[in-house]
Amino acid sequence: MIEVRNISKTYQAGGQSVHAVNSANLHIEKGEFLSIVGHSGSGKTTLLSLMGGLTRPDSGTVVIDGVDLWRIDDNELSGFRNRKINFIYQFASLIPTLTSLENVMLPSAFGNWSGNTEERARELLGLVGLSDKLNSYPSELSGGQQRRVAIARAFINEPEVLLADEPTGDLDEDTEGEIFDLFKRFNEEKGLTFVLVTHSRELAGRTKRQVRMTNGILSEN
Amino acid sequence: MSISLFGIAEKNLRRKYFRSIAIALSVAVVAGTLFSVTTVMESVELSLKRGTARLGADLMVVPTEYEQKARAALLAGEPTTFFMDRDFLRRVRNVKGVKVAAPQLFLESANYACCDVAEARLIGFDPDVDFTIAPWVKQKLDRPLGPTEILIGREVSYDVGGAMTFYGQEFTIAGYLEMTGMKFLDNSVFLPLDTAMRMARESSSKAQTTLAVTEEQISTILVQIDPKFSPEQVAIYIEHDIDGVKAVVSEQVISSVRKQLFVLLRSILVVSVILWVMALLMIGVIFSMIVNERQREVGLLRAMGARRGAVFRLIMYEASTLSILGGMIGIAAGGGSLYALRNVIRTSLNVPYLWPEAGQFAGIILLCLFLAFLTGIVAALYPAFRSSRMEPYAAIRKGE
């Protein structure tokens, strides 16, 4: 389902070249639940962004469901992301001028979606325990609550691929467990391909497969 | 409930209330100034055109020593009285290029009980040859004015059918002329020359003061020229052939006023344009800052599937909404101020002044609204373009 071949990405920082990702190869089957572990600065987030088509690699290819992400134009790539991919970020990723409900529904503004998006958004917010916060703005929510809204948003387009970067960072242990169970449920029930970036070995251990990133080099764990 | 690009833009503007108001007000100041200046310029232009058309005369022949008074009467409507011999009329008619010459007599009402209105301008005209007032009489009344009938300018606050007394004689108001914006016409009372002469003759017995004018006196001769000649040519011929008179070219009087006034108004317009450019730069800088501040947000939207065009349109929606809102506020404020200060404007400009017609007004409003809209678009164009071209990941990282 996801084929990453010889992918590399280099940044310029302070006059020096930083090889964030160095000739990475990765094959992920449809419905797999994979974690990428590594220390901070090892290139995990960059690899995730390359896989999601958020940044162009210097070399190599990313093919998802037979589509080479960097052979299609930007409009097609945007449409592809809107329909098939979603992201959960390390940071609070809500739009501050929109309510929780509007934030969850937001991806629908950029595609031709069928069905009742509002109803689905309400369901998802219910699943993450925020039915009573539909009309709250991010400034009125705690860090953990904001993270849960972002997680609800991640499922709104019923993606085939979910790329999550430290998704449970702000959450307490119990909530982290609940959220991870939700991830597993979507993975098992809906066949969602899940790629989870984490520095937590315990969390990584709960996924079916782990790969390691060290100084930009990817290896199987 | 659904969520749209425009809905997102609207929410962004509402949540950043004070910033949105500040941007809108900047545009409002520019739009209001441009609207006010343009309206005043159009008002004066319309008034000059209509007044000149109503006047109908290509030339106005007056005694040489009263040339300046005549110009002041024409433009500022200052009541004035001067006379010349009626024989000049015959001589002007014989000048090359003169097609029609019609006499007019300027009188002033007295500050006594014999006159209902003191210091009003009374203009006597010859119904047989006059080409300014007489055609109106023919068209509107469809009959000659009676021996005790008068016409009034639009600013004379009496009703048709009502009565006015001058020099002890009561007259009935048969009608009023359309508004021209020229005080000379709008504030005057018009009566046939015969009626004026009879009033003068009988003033010694009917009024507290005698109106000292004879049958052989007129104040001015209005001239229509043969189209084969220019007004300036015929003016030269008249002044060459007849001593003691000055031929004032109506168009020149109007155009000299237009020039002076428009120099002033043009300066204000230039200042307005400079203001507009400064507002453009300021709003451009503000939008650059806004876009920088929201770079991560833009990256997130792109990650969700927003195309470059959608990001561009989002920022442009915000800019154009604020600028149109600012334009509307500015136009309303400018229009309100012009209306509230209309009498002050008229008095201080001391030239003909008439509000533009509805169609012209609508045109000015649309123009100013369009300029306001353009302000937002031009100011936000580069920041919107730059923002939409950034890679999603780079944008997300930029906000770190």
Image (tube, coloured by chain):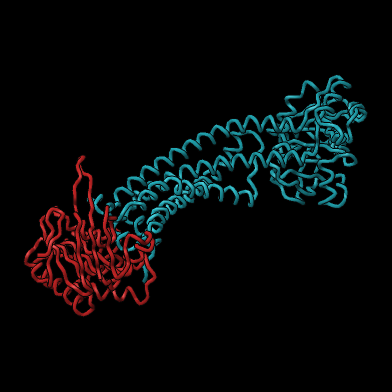
Chain colours: A red, B cyan
Answer with left or right where residue B318 lies relative to residue A186: right
Q: Is residue A21 left or right of residue B323?
A: left
Q: Is residue B199 above or below residue A64?
A: above
Split into 4 quadrants, where in the image is the C terminus of chain A?
A: bottom left
Q: Answer with the quarter of the image where residue B339 lies.
A: top right
Position in image of residue A73 (x %, y %): 38, 60
Residue B66, quarter of picture = top right
Q: Is A179 displayed left or right of A160 in the figure?
A: left
Asked if residue A131 shows in the view, the reply is no
- B141, A55: nearer the viewer: A55
Name the residue at 30% across, 59% down: A97
Depth check: give the residue in front, B258 or A112. Answer: A112
Q: In the visual, does B213 lie left or right of B255?
A: right
Kindly identify the residue that appears in the image at 84 percent across and 33 percent down. Answer: B223
Write down the quadrant of residue A176 in the picture: bottom left
Tell me where residue B10 appears, x and y as whole percent. Answer: 38, 59
Give the percent coordinates (x, y) of residue B99: 89, 35
Whether residue A209 can be seen here: yes
